Image (cartoon, rainbow, N blue to C red):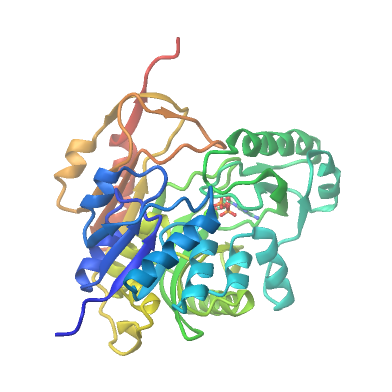
Amino acid sequence: MSKRPKLVLVGQLSMYPWVFEAAKRADIDLILVPRGDDTEESAGRAAAVVELLPLDIEGNPEAALSALADRYRREPFDGIMAGNEQAVPFVARAAGELGLTGLTEEAATVVRDKRSMRHHLLEAGLSAPGFVVIEDPDGWTDALTLRFPVVIKPVNGHSSFGVIRVDDKDSLEQAVARTWKLVEDHLGADDGLAAEAGVLVEEYLDGPEISAESLVYHGQVRVCAISWKGELTGPYFQETTLRAPAQLPAEILAAVEAEVIGAHHAFGVTEGTTHTELRLVGGVRPVLLEMGARIGGGGYMAHLAHVSSGIDLAADALRIHLGREPLCWRAEPVPAGHVAAYQVPVGSGGRIKHIHGVDSVRTDPRVDYVVETMGPGALLNPYPDFSGYPVIVLSRHGSDAEAESYRDHLARTLYVEYEEQG
Ligand code: ADP
Ligand code: CA
């Protein structure tokens, strides 16, 4: 019998089950490097995890790398994969040093930086909105040359943290200052945000938003699933719903694929998996918002891809990081239906008193997963700040219309009640 492959999974939050379950399905053992905000108890219980390897990747990457190399010398593992956005550069570097499959360090740097992605897209002749990078808060006047409305965001942000739409020039200075302050107040929160990286101001792309989940093996890209996020008009951008497969005409899907494949080439992303967000300007023309070289949504985008396309995206991503060919390269997948994700809106924010409706969601036969990330007593800041998604629901449906009506049902029945502010 051949030895079970072993992969180091860096920073995958253990309360999100999808990647762990995929490893189990694929008979892959995991050495988990827990995220700073994970607990040892929960991390140790996650499916397929055979070992915990705590490393201080953010605080002391050099020491983390040498501890990882020591672990490799004691008993080599077969691959390493990033379980969150911030881990991407560390994992690329580690893979390079240990001779394992992964991104080049250059590509990892490009996809961690929204400014850099914009430059590479333009160089490759792909679409990008007009943009200006502001290096300090007083530099906001540089963005007055853009066509309004514009969107302000941290250059290396996440989860729509500090992202603000601004409709007119008179509101620009104040909004830039607000994003800047959010980034500064957030320093030390261990999520990779850095004020010195700056703030990006870019022209607003008017049209619905979609997401593309891809696999890349030896430079060949397969766009596995395209999901519909719908109209998000701001001024803040909490993502609440996704449905897959996106109901779009074949020619638009083809244009999306071409744009996404081109972006992989432009960024030099040649191995692994990616989560790409785009807007369809005027409902038809795909323009990339950003790409992450990891599975999106803490892993749940893999479930959306799995149901809507039949491709076990997380298992195939793990295979690629083990240096193996993904199964979907040879076997044509069979879609299993329509799937939806709902992230309960944070709304006004505050201290959580009660989350209504969770029990009936748990027993609903349409629901595949409910993940409650926080409970009563937790403090949630309203957008454009970010402190997490309280509940994530993944459900399965016979049609897109059914998925949409279930989303409407959840919007009415599943919500956070906050304590009264005193
Ligand atoms: P983050 O890393 O915070 O997710 P994004 O660039 O994805 O950063 O921005 C978050 C959200 O803000 C996007 O999903 C989108 O809805 C909105 N957004 C960002 N940039 C633009 C833009 N240029 N035009 C329209 N909407 C945008
Ligand atoms: Ca995003």
Image location of residue 278, percent across then percent down:
55, 63
The residue positioned 62% from the left and 53% from the top of the image is: 156
The reply, left or right, for residue 241 in relation to residue 219 is left
Total labels drawn: 0
Of 395 and 85, the residue lying toward us: 85
Residue 86 visible in the shown view:
no
Screen quadrant of the N terminus: bottom left
Q: Nearer the viewer, residue 318 or 303?
A: 318
Q: Is residue 300 visible?
A: yes
327 relative position to 111: left or right? left
Q: Residue at x 58, y 75 (%)?
A: 259
State the image coordinates of residue 9 (x, y, percent, origin top left): 36, 62
Instruction: Give x and y (percent) for residue 377.
Output: 34, 24
The structure residue drawn at horizontal position 75% and vertical position 60%, both measured from the top left corner, is 130
Q: Which residue sits furthest top?
A: 422
Q: Position of residue 369 (x, y in %)?
A: 24, 52
Depth order, front residue of 26/323: 323
Q: Is residue 220 above or below residue 181?
A: below
Q: Viewed as shown, does residue 199 lie left or right of 144? A: left
The quadrant holding residue 358 is top left
Quadrant where the image shows the C terminus: top left
Query: Considering depth in this image, is 275 or 46 the residue closer to the camera?
Result: 46
Compared across the picture, whether 105 is left or right of 406 comes to: right
Residue at 69%, 64% (x, y): give it: 116
